[in-house]
Image (cartoon, coloured by chain):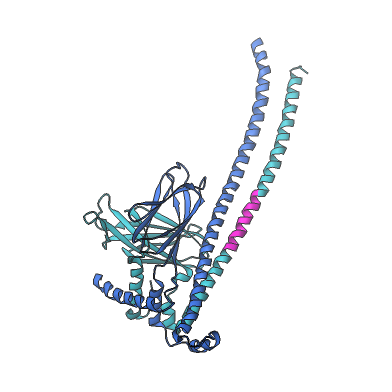
Chain colours: A blue, B cyan
Amino acid sequence: MGDKIWLPFSVLLLAALLAVLLPRVAGFTHSLDSDFTFTLPAGQRECFYQPMPLKASLEIEYQVLDGAGLDIDFHLASPEGRTLVFEQRKSDGVHTVETEVGDYMFCFDNTFSTISEKVIFFELILDNMGEQEQEQEDWKKYITGTDMLDMKLEDILFLRKGTIKQQKTLHIYESINSIKSRLSKSGHIQNLLRAFEARDRNIQESNFDRVNFWSLVNLMVMVVVSAIQVYMLKSLFEDKRKSRT
Amino acid sequence: MARARGLGLSLPLLLGQLLALMGGGGALYLEVRELEEKCFIQEIPDGTVVIGNYKTELYDPAMEKYQPSPQWINLFVFVKDPENKNLLARQYGPQGSFTFTSQSPGEHQICLHLESIRFSLFYDGKLAIHLDMKLGEHTNDYAEFAAKDKLTQLRLRVQQLVEQVEQIQKEQEYQRWREERFRQTSESTNRRVLWWSILQTLILVATGIWQMQHLKSFFKAKKLV
């Protein structure tokens, strides 16, 4: 299986290089993103690793969604082990690094808390990973026919004379790529809003529980204290009677 | 992963996916021990397809790096829906993918742990799980769309944009439902604060009256008043 992988890999690499050489296609690279939400128990530390190629961009954004205090320690280290970011007791944060080759490690640390577990949301946005060309190469194998639309659009959209025909057809793909990247960004923002909403909801639900609990306690304490007051007062007078007999 | 027609279509696609995992820009990974459970929460609307591509590796102390796991290391995946019902409880090989579709909107819990089903690991056997979870629109196999519906490049890209917009719309709808429930909780909390305060005041007044009356009758009985 090992050597079977390397042969098409070199073919794809060649295709990717060719795609890079075509004008204006390499200008746009799409971003990969992933988001995770997990529960970090009290007194524990959780680390994640992200392999990165050279000169890509790694953006990490995290938020604490639940847990008393809503704070966590955050640590980001480069592949050599050098600390890039170290934050303590923060409830959210955003960091962007330009990467070198290797595995970047980031850790969430809840060791300062002894009883409360935290729910942490983090989102990784990777840019310039060079995968857009590969995806397009895959698609090129499965598409059928050429777009008649390309020919017509040339006349409508592009009034410049003497430009290369290839550049004209590439221009509409650029618009589509730009729409795609903006939609991806909308998706990221939606993720963030969802995380904010989850955090607010958790705060509200804990408020709700607290109001119920402490009101009940308050009521019971009031009733008990009033009964004790009456009892003690009565006992002050009853003692005299006992001592007489 | 991809139910593409024929090996000719699926093999380059699978390799492309594996490359995405193995190449310089790979997927996120985390270090675990055997039987250590790692859980993730996914808050998704209903009818969302989730595909998790994973690859596991075993640390080789002799070579001081991670090697692909042997076949007797299996990944156990448990998925619980917001009502705590089991959506998925299955055992998978050392690499591959798991998939499920959400039936109800809300927080789903995805728990993974590794277990060796034949030989026992060294006591401090370190393992790594490379994980790449795709939701909604990202699970679509556009290559398959193109081949099935005979789409041109332009139409395929527009199709992808349409799917992306649909997913954003679905998330927005889900957020609206969430916000409504959130508002209900807030209003209920507000109401309760009000009612508890009124109740407390009434009980305070009532106990005060009871105390006075009780003591009055007590002192009268003792002929002190």
Q: Which of B22 and B143 is in front in this view?
A: B22
Residue A176 is situated, as x and y percent measured from the top left of the image, at 50, 77
User: Can the viewer see residue A245 in this picture?
Assistant: no
In the rendered image, residue B186 lying in the magenta stretch gets the answer yes
Taking the image as shown, residue B141 lies to the left or right of residue B124, namely right
Task: Please state the horizontal and vertical placement of residue B37, each as a whole percent of the image.
Answer: 38, 53
Q: In this view, does A4 lie above or below A73?
A: below
Q: Nearer the viewer, residue B176 or A158?
A: A158
Q: Quadrant location of residue A219? A: top right
Query: x%, y% of residue A13?
Result: 32, 74
**Viewport quadrant of the C terminus of chain A:** top right
Image: magenta residue range: B175-189
Q: How many marks?
A: 0
In the picture, the quarter occupied by the N terminus of chain A is: bottom left
Residue lying furthest front in this view?
A162
Q: Which residue is drawn at 27% across and 50% down?
A: B124
Residue extending furthest toward the right:
B225
Toward the viewer: B201 or A240?
A: B201
Q: Can residue A127 be seen in this view?
A: yes
User: Is residue B155 positioned above or below A49 on the image?
Assistant: below
Prevailing secondary structure of the magenta residues: helix
Q: Does the magenta stretch include residue B163?
A: no
Q: Which residue occupies 27% across, 75% down?
A: A7
Q: Residue furthest top?
A: A244
